[in-house]
Amino acid sequence: MSRFIIIREDLVQDPLTIVTDGLLIGRLQLCELVLNHPAVSRAQAGIKWVDDVYYLFSLRPGNPPKLNGRALEETEALAPGDIIEVGPFRLEVDREDGALQLKVSLQIGVVLGEHDSDVPNLRTTKLLPEAPTEGKKAAKPRAAPLPGNKALDFFWDKRIREAGKMVRPSPLFPKSQRRSGKAQFSWTPTSDLARRWPVSFFIWGAVIVGALSVSAAYWYANAYAPAPVSRSHAVANMEMNPPIAVKANADSCTNCHSLTSSTETKCASCHNTEAFVATIIKPHVAAGIGCVSCHAEHQGSEFNPAHTALVTCTACHNDANQSTYNGRRVSTPHQGTFGYPVVNEKWTWPGLDDGDWALKKIAIARLPTDSDEQWRSKQFHSLHVQRVRSGPGMRGNLQGELSCSSCHQSFNPIDRTTPRTTCGECHNGRIEQGSNRVLIAKDKPNCTSCHVQHVRDIRTWNPSLFAQSGKGK
Ligand code: HEC
Ligand code: HEC
Ligand code: HEC
Ligand code: HEC
Ligand code: HEC
Ligand code: HEC
Ligand code: HEC
């Protein structure tokens, strides 16, 4: 083991004695002699003791140290009084009790290259006295350079590798390069020494937030709904045949609620099939009455949005209802009687418009000679006579169908009194097909049997009333 005494004049430190088998000089923090300047290589030079002689080694052929002003080729023996230059640093060599002493100073303001031959020139031109020879250990003549030596190459390779590998990354992750020279002493506020958030924090954060939002959308959605949706909208398969919806709703929220379109648009787009199109009558459209005015939702799974719609008519069409709908008022219809409107002793049925009439598929067309009243009478009579079965307490023809005498007792003059009493035989009350559940009491009017709300629904309120099976045949 050789000894090195380092005197850092540049850092104003106490002399330091290092015992090592080879002194590594460079910018790396793990070099024995750290010279921190960008012009200094990571491991630029080394000094090793071989047979009582200290040799200087150039470890970076591209950036060799200078010995007495000359760039060092490979190795050179060191003698007291030698000057080594590494970047802007100047190392004065001396021997002391077998140890090698290096006095390090920084040549501030020296432009590299300018002073190339400074010291040697002085010496060779004898302006400076020869290095003192008497009494000093430096009296020995300079030893010859070492011949090329594989073992020494390996030695330095290993040292450099170790020094490089062992550099611990700064836990502070500075963003910018370390400054050099005087600049490193002028204080500037910096945020780049904050400890970075480990990436794993973000990944785990994202995973947890993602999982929470997915599960919230899954479970909390139902908790957030005011009440469960009706069974018809909760189940995953459709029951009616022919189908009245494009697909089952299967308890989805977004089929009815979305940011891009209104609930009504959503209802209408799903309820749009061959057998059922969710149309709304013109007076209701004009009054701003939509699906949700008649079909509520979130009333529990027992709730049936179609059945309850049947009773909304009287709840809204009521003298007591003070609300206005697009500026329109409502009142109790046909003077509180059920469905036979007579105004000033005259039967006032407006009849069906051309589109609705065409849907009935009845082969009777309006003649050019027909007055409005004659055409409405033709519509009414052809909707009922020989098309509809006679009611329970009514006379009918041999086939049990409505005939002229079912309603008219006499024809000359025409009996107008009896027909006015017949309507309730068929248009009052309603029971659910299949289950026979009473939806509208027998003595209450079935509003939608006369005022059909969904004209493009092939189902009818009471198929058993038709003479032939099915409506429109
Ligand atoms: C994703 C499609 C879809 C949407 C959107 C949808 N429904 Fe339905 N609706 C259905 C299905 C499926 C049925 C049950 C049909 C069956 O069982 O065959 C149904 C049944 C109904 C019924 C009849 C219930 C019964 O059992 O008689 C009404 C009334 C109804 N929906 C109204 C609405 C209204 C009002 C909206 C908008 C608020 C709406 N629907 C939105 C698919 C939908
Ligand atoms: C069949 C259609 C339909 C489905 C499916 C549906 N909703 Fe609704 N929802 C409605 C209707 C209709 C309203 C009443 C809107 C109105 O009054 O304008 C409503 C209202 C609401 C409201 C507002 C209640 C209030 O008092 O204003 C919330 C919240 C809501 N729904 C959440 C949900 C959630 C969560 C789901 C899924 C579990 C869901 N809905 C599924 C049709 C539906
Ligand atoms: C003025 C009230 C009213 C409005 C508005 C209304 N409906 Fe209806 N709807 C009813 C009534 C009443 C029934 C019960 C069947 C009948 O007797 O016509 C019904 C039945 C239904 C049915 C069941 C059909 C069947 O064959 O069982 C569906 C589906 C439906 N409506 C969807 C809608 C949709 C979608 C809208 C909005 C575009 C809408 N309704 C607007 C009153 C209304
Ligand atoms: C939320 C209130 C509301 C509900 C529910 C409602 N309507 Fe209406 N209805 C109106 C309004 C408002 C008008 C427009 C009145 C006007 O134009 O003078 C109207 C118009 C009508 C008309 C046309 C009247 C005319 O002067 O030609 C008929 C028929 C009608 N409704 C029947 C029904 C039936 C049948 C139901 C039940 C399935 C029903 N309405 C449910 C509010 C409602
Ligand atoms: C037997 C068939 C029939 C029944 C049932 C019936 N109506 Fe009418 N309704 C008519 C006829 C016909 C008219 C007269 C023509 C018109 O004004 O539209 C009429 C007129 C109306 C009008 C507009 C004129 C007015 O007086 O305001 C409304 C609203 C109305 N009905 C609502 C209802 C409601 C709500 C029910 C259920 C409680 C109902 N109708 C039951 C046949 C019926
Ligand atoms: C479902 C009951 C019903 C049946 C069936 C029926 N009518 Fe009528 N008829 C009426 C009603 C309602 C009126 C209008 C009465 C009034 O003015 O209040 C009427 C009016 C008439 C009128 C008077 C003109 C008019 O339209 O006001 C004649 C004529 C007539 N019916 C002939 C017949 C003949 C012929 C048959 C058999 C082919 C027949 N009716 C079957 C209910 C019926
Ligand atoms: C014997 C049973 C029966 C009697 C009585 C009866 N109707 Fe009807 N009515 C029906 C049937 C069934 C339909 C359905 C026809 C269809 O949809 O093709 C109907 C259809 C109608 C319609 C047309 C509804 C639509 O599809 O737009 C009106 C309006 C109507 N009836 C009014 C009356 C009036 C007013 C009376 C009393 C004068 C009356 N009906 C007596 C069975 C009857």
Image (tube, rainbow, N blue to C red):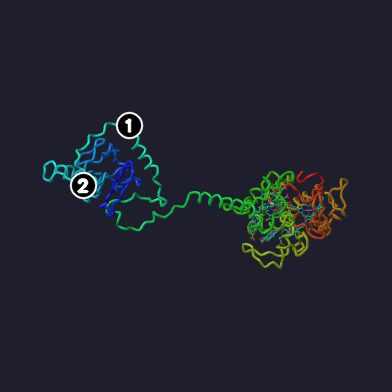
Task: Answer left or right for 83 relative to 48.
Answer: left
Which residue is more in the foreground, 94 or 63?
A: 94
Packing grade of label 2 (10 A; few <14, some 14-19, many >=20) is few
Q: Position of residue 296 (x, y in %)?
A: 69, 57
Residue 189: quadrant of the picture: bottom left
Q: Is residue 45 visible?
A: no
What's the residue type where badge 2 is placed?
Answer: Val
Q: Secondary structure at mark 2?
A: loop
Task: Answer left or right for 422 relative to 106.
Answer: right
Earlier in the chain: of badge 2 and badge 1, it is 2
Q: Mark 1 sits on what residue? A: 150
Ligand 6's quadrant: bottom right
Task: Name the front one of labels 2 and 1.
Answer: 1
Q: Mark 2 sits on what residue? A: 111
468 lies above or below 323: above
Ligand 2 has an atom within 8 Å of the beta carbon of the residue at disc 2: no
What's the residue type where badge 1 is placed?
Answer: Lys
As drawn, the residue found furthest toward the front would be 135
